[in-house]
Image: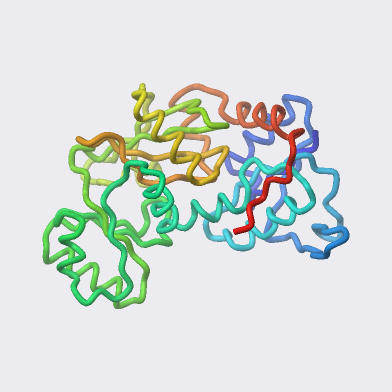
Amino acid sequence: MKIGILSQDANLYSTRRLHEACQQRGHEAVIINALRCYMNINSVQPSIHFKGTDLIGFDAIIPRIGSDITFYGCAVLRQFEMMDVFAVNQSIAISRSRDKLRSLQLLSREGVGMPVTGFASKPDDVLDLIKMVGGTPLVIKLLEGTQGIGVVLAETQKAAESVIEAFLGLKAHIMVQEYIEEAGGADIRCFVIGGKVIASMKRQAAEGEFRSNLHRGGSASLIRITPEERKTAIAAAKAMGLSVAGVDLLRSKRGPLIMEVNSSPGLEGIEAATGKDIAGMIIDYIEKNAGKSRRNLQNQ
C-alpha cells in the first residue's frame, strides 16, 4: 500500500516510527507537510498538490496534525477523504477532540465519567462559578492550551478569583474543573486502536508539580488498568469517533474520570514504558481496514 503520514516534522519520534513500521511491512510511506499542500476543490476530480506534484495513489493517510495547525491540517485531511482515501482518524473526529469544550460535552452526553467542569465567557458571579465545581482547590485551563501549558492549580479562593478574572480580562476562553486530589499528581494514558486498549502507562508529575505531562518533567511507567478504566477509555474514544486515540484519565474515589482524548498521541513515552510496537499496531490496523468502505463521512 501507499501510506501518507501528515506531519510537519519528519524527524519527530512518532513520525519516524510510523515511517519505519510502514517500510518494515513492505508499504510505501510518504511524509507530507500539510501546510505545504494546496488543494483543487471541485465536484469532478478533487486533488491535492505539493510543490507542483499531484498527490495521487494513496491507500491510507495517518494524520499527525499538530494542535497549532488543526484548521488547515483538517482541511487537507478532509480533501484526502473526498478523494476516497482511508483516514486512520477522520477530520471530523479530530476537530471534535481538539475542541476541549465540545469534547467534554460529547463525553457528558454519553455518560462518560469526567471531573465537574464549568465554562463561562463573562460570568456575572465568579464566586458561583467556583462554587459550581466544588470550590477550591480547583484547576483552571485555557481551552487552547496543550502539553500542560495554560493549566493553573488555584489552591485558595482568592487565587482562583484572581486567575479567573485575569484570564477573562485577556478575553481568553477557560474551563474551571474540580481538582482530583486523590489522583496524587498522576494520570493514566490509555492507547486505543480500533476500539481496544492496546497499551497503557501511568504518568507521574515531577516533585512540586501537579501536571503529569512528560513534557513538564513527568515520568512514565507500566501500569495494569482495571476493567472499568478500560471500558471508560474505549467509550471516550468512541464518543469522539477516533479509531486511534490517547485517552488520559484520573483515578478518583468515584471511578475513572476522563481528562482529555488526544487524536495524535505521541508514541515515544508509551513505547518506552510498555516495550510494545505501537507504530506497528497502527499499520496493522490500516492493513485490516483500509480496504473497507471509505465513504463514512458525517455531515456535521
Q: Quadrant of the C terminus?
A: bottom right
x, y percentage for residue 218?
A: 34, 39
Q: Position of residue 126 (x, y in %)?
A: 19, 70
Which quadrant of the structure image shows residue 230?
A: top left
Q: Nearer the viewer, residue 125 or 149?
A: 125
Q: Is 83 positioned to the left or the right of 129 in the image?
A: right
Of residues 139 and 46, which is closer to you in this image? 46
Q: Residue at x 66, y 45 (%)?
A: 10
Residue 205 at what x, y percent from top left? 29, 40
In the picture shown, does residue 159 fall above or below 229? below
Q: Residue at x 38, y 24 (%)?
A: 222
Of 73 and 197, the residue lying toward us? 197
In the foreground, 134 or 222: 134
Instruction: Say which residue appears at 20% left-offset and 56% top-offset.
Output: 133
Image position of 117 with respect to 89: above or below: below
Q: The N terminus appears in which quarter of the rendering?
A: top right
Percent coordinates x, y for residue 198 in the rendering:
50, 25
Position of 228 compared to 298: left or right?
left
Rendered position, 137 above or below 142: above
> Above or below — where is 239 with respect to 190?
below
